Amino acid sequence: MLPKEDSIVGEIINFRGLVYSPINEQGVVFLFGRLLDDLNMYIEEVRT
């Protein structure tokens, strides 16, 4: 039997499809992507 992993989430924000606030860099990238239209910006490239 595998051990149960605890879920780690930020505070509830319910903002444009993101229920919890980001807790890492990837969450911030996702949130920024949701704001692109408001900022009149485009993504030309995504790299690691």
Image: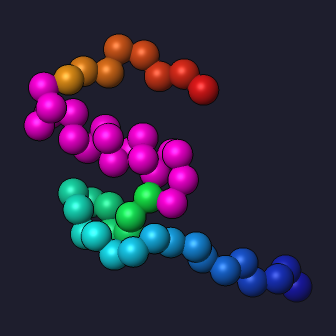
Left/right placement of residue 6 relative to residue 39 reads right
Q: Does the magenta stretch include residue 3?
A: no
Residue at (47, 22) in percent of width and height = 46
| Quadrant placement of the C terminus | top right
Residue 5: % across, % down? 72, 78
Residue 9: % across, % down? 50, 72
* Image quadrant assignment for residue 20: bottom left
Q: Check the image and tell me how it is coloured.
A: rainbow
| Quadrant placement of the N terminus | bottom right
What residue range appears in magenta?
23-40
Residue at (26, 44) in percent of width and height = 34
Q: Is residue 36 magenta?
A: yes
Residue 14: % across, % down? 25, 69
Q: Residue furthest top?
A: 44
In this view, 23 is above or below 47:
below
Left/right placement of residue 35 relative to residue 30 reads left
Relative to the observer, which residue lies in front, 1 or 46? 46
The secondary structure making up most of the magenta span is helix
Residue at (24, 21) in percent of width and height = 42
Residue at (32, 61) in percent of width and height = 18
Residue 12: % across, % down? 34, 75
Total marks shown come to: 0
In this view, 27 is above or below 48:
below
Left/right placement of residue 9 relative to residue 19 reads right
Left/right placement of residue 47 relative to residue 12 reads right
